[in-house]
Amino acid sequence: MSVAAKGAPLLSRVVGYSVAIANNAGNIIRDIMKKGELGIVEKESAQDLQTEADRAAQRSIITALQKYFPKSTIIGEEGEEEVKDLSGQVFDPTADSSVSGITCPSHLTSVAEEELVIWVDPLDGTAEYTQGLLDHVTVLIGIASGGKAVGGVIHQPYYNYQNPGSKLGRTIWGIVGGSVGGMPLTAPPDGKLIVTTTRSHSSSTVNDAIAALSPTEVLRVGGAGHKVMMLLEGKAHVYVFASPGCKKWDTCAPQAVLEAAGGVLSDIQGKVIPYHASAPHRNSTGVLASAAGQDHQAFLTKIPQHVKDNLKA
Ligand SMILES: Nc1ncnc2c1ncn2[C@@H]1O[C@H](COP(=O)(O)O)[C@@H](O)[C@H]1OP(=O)(O)O
Ligand SMILES: [Mg+2]
Ligand SMILES: [Mg+2]
Ligand SMILES: [Mg+2]
């Protein structure tokens, strides 16, 4: 059954349309890089950049979500001023039937449109995008209901860009307690502990948290979406970010997809991250995410108290 079929639960439809909408945003991101006019501006700091690709991708995602799910709350990283003009052409996700079998657990089948809060990161890994580390970039659409991350889409527009002849880009989606699809899921190797963390937003607290886990390897890569993909494909066991830099749009989609696949994402103290419409944007108490089959609690226990105390809400 295609997700657009009559009778599919609303949440399945939102996830299915979001796959098409994220893929379209990926085309926009690639086109802007090809033209080479990135239009980079600094937001809060030199580590916090925005490009024309962030702006154009956000415009395309938000206008489409607003048109097809007008009663839902939609919150995008790049602010509201980008989406006032709805008169231009709005992307139509309804014709895309590339994804099917998006199932919902019974407690989510009757969720209403107005209950959903959709967190949009049109381009996660902006720093890496500007530096040419293209496969660190993802498009993130996360869906929350009752303050919980329940559905998500992670699109990686440059997957395979260094393997000419292979299909460029991939999209993984999931509903917590329902189905997950779009890429093969692999467990990380036994007998090792591979930690993934930030490459562009490091600090002594970030490094203290990593050292306390005694990893066999540390992979410093960009993007929250990209790091969670590494957990899903068995390239890392745990993602640690003991810093307040991540926002709700960075973690909502990755959390939903990871949890649909059996993993866990929480703050650095183990608390559930809230995603209701009035939740603070900043994840001020950090992020810790574990691949399926890992002992999340054991990782949390090892995080030093001074790191936890340093990250107060
Ligand atoms: N200090 C920060 N300022 C702005 N954004 C941050 C900061 N730290 C993390 N982020 C966001 O979280 C994502 C994951 O962080 P990191 O790559 O450092 O692990 C980044 O790609 C960035 O998202 P975005 O690129 O969408 O602005
Ligand atoms: Mg940003
Ligand atoms: Mg981001
Ligand atoms: Mg972003």
Image (cartoon, helix red, strand yellow):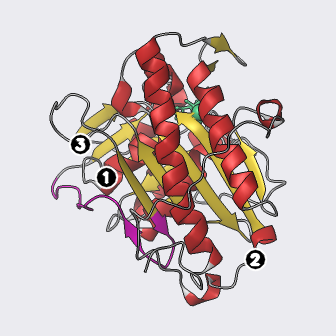
Front label number (1 vs 2): 2
Q: Amino acid at mark 2?
A: Ala
**Badge 3: how crowded within 10 Å, few (<14), some, or many (20+)?**
few
| Majority SS type along the magenta span | loop
Q: What residue is shown at x 17% (from left), y 55% (from top)?
A: 189
Q: Which residue is mark 1?
A: 237
Whether 81 is among the magenta residues is no
* Circle number at residue 167: 3
Ranked by sequence position, the earlier of labels 1 and 3 is 3
Locate residue 293: give its quadrant: bottom left
Secondary structure beneath dot 1 equals loop
The answer to whether residue 105 is above or below residue 126 is below
Residue 29 seen from this side: yes
Number of numbered labels in the structure image: 3
Q: Amino acid at mark 1?
A: His
State the quadrant of the N terminus: bottom left
Q: Nearer the viewer, residue 230 or 78?
A: 78
The answer to whether residue 26 is above or below residue 181 is above
Q: What residue is shown at x 48% (from left), y 57% (from top)?
A: 301
Whether 188 is among the magenta residues is yes
Q: Which residue is mark 2?
A: 112
Ligand 1 quarter of the rendering:
top right
